Image: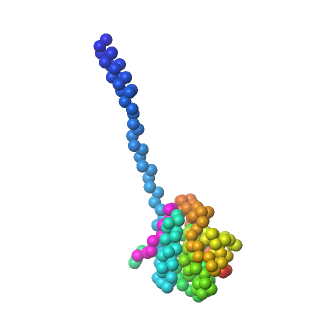
């Protein structure tokens, strides 16, 4: 009888102790796609290109862009030329190289260089033009007007790039998008 009473007391005491769940295993970190760029053929615009890269890096998490180091594969190549800004349509993948042409014609007409670089980078990340459009839409390009200096993607543009690098998209087309008036 004493044995059954002690067993019962021990069982009751065990039930009174709160149970704590084992710590949940941390979800595996999803690594962002890492892309590289080179501005070696557009060095006169290096600071504006770097600013545009920073805009995208702070706007999205599924893809991050870094300046390529010597000998490293380049995914996005910036080239200065006399024409209108244009870019190959992405989304660019780590095994690809797409080109962005920083057309001096739009720059000479007074369009903001950082906005141009950010807009053209949007094409390489898979975004089409949205024209006509307001200055608040990065992909509206030149329809935002010469006075528009906004280099930032809006919420919809950010979400599209997030989806493009969520692991469900196919490789980019490589089609060159000529921005009629950047």
Residue at position x 54%, y 69% in the image: 92
Residue 153 showing in the rendered view: yes
Q: Can you say which quadrant of the picture contains the N terminus?
A: top left
Residue 6 at x, y = what percent?
A: 31, 18
Q: Is residue 146 left or right of residue 51?
A: right
Residue placed farthest to the right in the image? Answer: 132
Residue placed farthest to the top in the image? Answer: 1
Residue 102 at x, y = what percent?
A: 56, 82
Q: Can you say which quadrant of the picture contains the C terminus?
A: bottom right
Q: Does the magenta stretch include residue 66?
A: yes
Residue at position x 61%, y 84% in the image: 110
Q: Is residue 114 magenta?
A: no
Closest to the observer: 109 or 2?
A: 109
| Quadrant in the rendering for residue 174 | bottom right
Residue at position x 53%, y 59% in the image: 167
Residue at position x 42%, y 49% in the image: 26
Residue 104 at x, y = what percent?
A: 58, 86
Residue 87 at x, y = what percent?
A: 59, 77
Question: How many labels sit on residues?
Answer: 0
Closest to the observer: 69 or 58?
A: 58
Rendered view: 52 above or below 166? below
Closest to the observer: 121 or 55?
A: 55
State the scheme by which the image is colored: rainbow
Residue placed farthest to the front in the image? Answer: 147
Closest to the observer: 56 or 121?
A: 56
Instruction: Look at the image and give the residue range highlighted in magenta.
Output: 61-69
Residue 97 showing in the rendered view: no
């Amino acid at each position: 009888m004493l044995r059954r009473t002690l067993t019962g007391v021990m069982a009751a005491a065990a039930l009174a102790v709160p149970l704590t769940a084992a710590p949940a295993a941390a979800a595996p970190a999803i690594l962002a796609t890492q892309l590289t760029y080179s501005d070696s053929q557009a060095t006169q615009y290096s600071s504006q290109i770097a600013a545009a890269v920073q805009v995208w890096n702070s706007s999205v998490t599924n893809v991050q862009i870094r300046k390529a180091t010597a000998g490293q594969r380049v995914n996005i190549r910036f080239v200065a030329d006399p024409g209108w800004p244009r870019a190959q349509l992405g989304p660019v993948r780590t095994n690809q190289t797409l080109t962005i042409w920083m057309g001096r014609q739009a720059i000479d007409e007074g369009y903001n260089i950082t906005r141009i670089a950010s807009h053209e980078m949007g094409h390489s990340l898979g975004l089409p033009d949205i024209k006509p459009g307001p200055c608040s839409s990065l992909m509206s390009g030149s329809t935002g007007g010469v006075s528009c200096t906004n280099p930032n993607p809006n919420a919809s543009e950010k979400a599209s790039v997030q989806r493009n690098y969520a692991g469900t998209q196919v490789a980019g087309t490589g089609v060159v998008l000529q921005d009629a008036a950047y």
